[in-house]
Image (cartoon, helix red, strand yellow):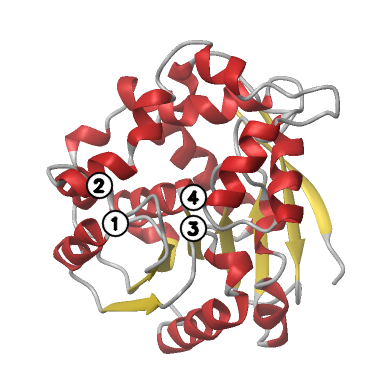
């Protein structure tokens, strides 16, 4: 796979964007989650390229060394969504199929809801729309599963707990990722990414930005064709929010559930995810 890395300027710096596949293929924007980077899509993109699609995978705000502002106020969902819009404008001609996992899914939902003219189709993996997730928090199971969201709000404590040791990564973070389904190799890779100067605080600020952002305002229903993929081995997102998601989409909606798969769908089940995604893209070329 030949990867072309381009730089996209946003108000707080520069994002590195990985592009691959046929240069004239329909663009597919791939948004990663916590605590990963665009490489988390590497097992999915070959199938998209073979089908003629061009993939665009940015290293998002805070993860990109060239765009790592300080302070939680720089990590509101509105700002993260604005970054994605800039990437679509500059690298996809203003419209793209949008695919997101984890926090990338949260950004993808916002994009499709508030900026449908920029979105050919939406595919969200693992995380439901904000309103469905918030509603699911009335259940004991989801509140318990989301304990870390509250813990990450604390100043400096998570950084101290997840600080790298003399090997250059956090064994606590590596262990946590392994317990949620990551392979040892990928857990260490992601822990090493978070050991870069300023990277952990920036990634945690995505969670801290909830307190100063506008997620509680609610988004309009999604009006573009939507595929939602969830896995029943996900320890972070429970079924309650998933069952509410269809209420927030007025366009054609498809739900796919992967059995026996953890939260880390793009790397644990890339072939199944790619197959579902390709069916969705073919049915809704935009």
- Density class for disc 1 (Cα within 10 Å; few <14, some 14-19, many ≥20) is many
**Whether label 3 touches label 4, CB < 8 Å:** yes
Give the numbered dot on residue 238: 1
**Whether label 2 touches label 1, CB < 8 Å:** yes
Inter-mark Cα distance, 4 to 2 = 20 Å
Give the numbered dot on residue 104: 4
- Density class for disc 2 (Cα within 10 Å; few <14, some 14-19, many ≥20) is many
Residue 89 shows in the view: no
Residue 279 shows in the view: yes
Whichever of callouts 2 and 1 sits on the residue coming sooner in the sequence is 2
Q: Is residue 117 above or below residue 61?
A: below
The kind of secondary structure element at disc 2 is: helix
Q: Looking at the image, which is closer to me, 255 or 19?
A: 255
The kind of secondary structure element at disc 1 is: loop
Whichever of callouts 2 and 3 sits on the residue coming sooner in the sequence is 3
Whichever of callouts 1 and 4 sits on the residue coming sooner in the sequence is 4
Q: Residue at x 72, y 54 (%)?
A: 184
Q: Is residue 188 above or below residue 251?
A: above
Q: Which residue is mark 3?
A: 100
């Amino acid at each position: 796979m030949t990867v072309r890395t381009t730089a996209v300027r946003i108000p707080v710096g520069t994002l590195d964007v990985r592009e691959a596949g046929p240069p004239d293929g329909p663009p597919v924007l791939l948004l990663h989650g916590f605590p990963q980077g665009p490489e988390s899509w590497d097992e999915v993109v070959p199938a998209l390229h073979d089908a003629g699609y061009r993939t665009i995978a940015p290293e998002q705000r805070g993860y990109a060394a060239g765009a790592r502002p300080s302070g939680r106020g720089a990590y509101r969902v509105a700002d993260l969504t604005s970054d994605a819009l800039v990437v679509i404008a500059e690298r996809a001609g203003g419209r793209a199929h949008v695919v997101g996992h984890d926090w990338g899914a949260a950004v993808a939902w916002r994009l499709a809801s508030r900026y449908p003219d920029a979105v050919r189709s939406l595919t969200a993996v693992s995380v439901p729309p904000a309103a469905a997730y918030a509603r699911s928090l009335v259940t004991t199971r989801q509140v318990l599963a989301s304990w870390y969201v509250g813990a990450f709000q604390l100043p400096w404590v998570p950084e101290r707990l997840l600080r790298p040791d003399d090997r250059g990564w956090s064994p606590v973070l590596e262990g946590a990722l392994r317990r949620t389904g990551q392979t040892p190799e990928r857990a260490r890779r992601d822990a090493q990414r978070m050991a870069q100067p300023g990277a952990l605080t920036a990634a945690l600020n995505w969670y801290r930005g909830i307190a100063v952002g506008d997620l509680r305002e609610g988004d309009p229903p999604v009006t573009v064709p939507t595929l939602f993929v969830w896995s029943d081995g996900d320890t972070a997102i429970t079924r309650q929010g998933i069952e509410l998601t269809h209420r927030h989409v007025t366009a054609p909606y498809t739900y796919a559930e992967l059995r026996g798969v953890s939260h880390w769908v793009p790397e644990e089940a890339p072939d199944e995810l790619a197959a579902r995604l390709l069916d969705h893209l073919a049915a809704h070329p935009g």
